[in-house]
Structures are given as structure tokens and as C-alpha cells.
Amino acid sequence: GENVEQHPSTLSVQEGDSAVIKCTYSDSASNYFPWYKQELGKRPQLIIDIRSNVGEKKDQRIAVTLNKTAKHFSLHITETQPEDSAVYFCAASNQAGTALIFGKGTTLSVSS
Amino acid sequence: DADVTQTPRNRITKTGKRIMLECSQTKGHDRMYWYRQDPGLGLRLIYYSFDVKDINKGEISDGYSVSRQAQAKFSLSLESAIPNQTALYFCATSDPIAGAQETQYFGPGTRLLVL
């Protein structure tokens, strides 16, 4: 079945640095790729998403890039701040478009 | 997101007991999902439902059952709880446009401990 690999599992950066999280997916039929942020003790919340007909999308300090040929997509956070510290999950839609398959998550720590 | 609620928020139970986790939503979404979250394993799909007559197994449905009582309510049951079902359980909803996947909105989670 569909598989989503996410790397790294943990990432530590200094405030102001950039952070990049990468995901690969196995099903070439996947066409929707969201990213969720989960703060400690909270529920996951969507921060950005991209569809297969777009190569890049930006929203202020965050951006997502998609390479359909290589079946990978990445989250880029610039000018990181302590409040960016959280667990980030990537996901890909399954072949039928009926569900999302999530990566295992990346714990991002931003130190000031 | 207060539009998706889960009860209870925390539950401790014993091995062999039957328990039910409930999810309600006021978003008017047709699609509802149950996930479990374990450290280092991410979010894994247990069951999902597209309407009251449609129930589908996810990747880890063994040991679980669900009931879609109404568009707004989706319950998850553990018929005979076991310790490795100790986890954080999330309900989610979505409203796909033209059948395509869209944003999933998560409830606050239920933390379950099986002794």
C-alpha cells in the first residue's frame, strides 16, 4: 500500500535559521500533500498544503515544494522562531483519494 | 477547533474491558476519520466513514470497531481492550470538494491507558 517516509525524525536549529523537512511517497496517483503542525499537547493543525498541479506554494515564512517525478515534497521554514517548535507531519492522499497517509513526524526544536 | 469534540478526553481502563470513544462535529462534514498516535509512529488510520451507511477499514483496524450514528457522530469501540492499544486517539473530519481530498480538521484527542 501507500507509504510516506519523512526525514529527519528530529531537527534542532537556532532561532533565525532555516529548517527543511523532506517526505517521499510511493503512490504516483497521490495528488494532495498537506503539512500539519502539532504543538505539545495539542491537536494537529494544517499549516500548508499543495496539489499535484503546482510545484511550489508559499505562505509567509513557510513554503512547500513538490517534485512529482521524484515523488518527494519538502517543507521549508525560514527565519525560525521558538514558537515554531512542534512536531510536523507530512501526508499524501491515497490512490483512491479517500484518505491521507501520514509520515511518522519530525520534532523541530528552535532554540533562542 | 471547537467544531470537533471528543469524549472522554482521558480514560484509564483495564485489559479485557469494552470501551467507547465518541466524536461529534458541528462542521457539517460528511467524512469522518479515527486515528491513533503513538510516539515515533505518527498518525495511523483506524477507520473512516463517508456517510452513515459507509464504513471503511484503515491500515490498523484489527481490535477496533466503529459506528456512524449520524452525520455528526462517529464512535470508536475497543471490544476487549489490551495494553498495546494505549495511545492518543484523534477523530478528524473533512469536506472534500468534487471528491478530492481536502483539509482534515482534528478533534482534541482522547488519551487512553489500558492497564
Image (spheres, rainbow, N blue to C red):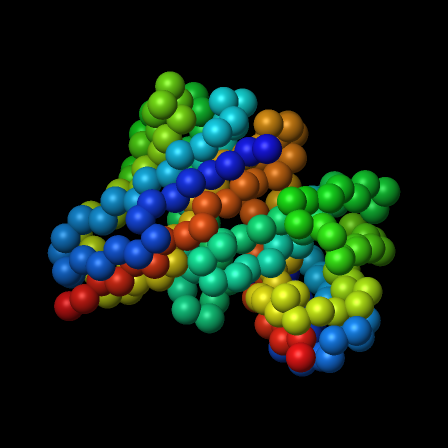
Place of residue B83 in the rendered image (x, y in percent of width and height, measured from the top left): 66, 71
Q: Quadrant of the C terminus of chain A?
A: bottom left
Place of residue A102 in the rendered image (x, y in percent of width and height, measured from the top left): 50, 45
Residue A21 vertical placement versus B34 (above, below): above
- Please report the residue visible at 71 percent of the width from the left and 69 percent of the height from the top: B82
Left or right, B36 with respect to A78, comes to right
Left or right, B47 with respect to B53, comes to left
Task: Say which of A52 and B47 sits in front.
Answer: B47
- Please report the residue visible at 45 percent of the width from the left and 58 percent of the height from the top: B40
Left or right, B48 with respect to A94, comes to right
Residue A70 vertical placement versus B28 (above, below): above
* Residue A70 visible to the viewer: yes
Q: Quadrant of the N terminus of chain A?
A: top right
* Residue B73 visible to the viewer: no
- Please report the residue visible at 59 percent of the width from the left and 27 percent of the height from the top: A95
| Residue B101: quarter of image | top right
Task: Say which of B78 and A82 sits in front.
Answer: B78
Place of residue B110 in the rendered image (x, y in percent of width and height, measured from the top left): 62, 69
Residue extending farthest top: A69
Task: Say which of A92 and A24 sits in front.
Answer: A24
Place of residue A21 in the rendered image (x, y in percent of width and height, measured from the top left): 30, 45
Q: How many marks overall?
A: 0
- Please report the residue visible at 52 percent of the width from the left and 27 percent of the height from the top: A27
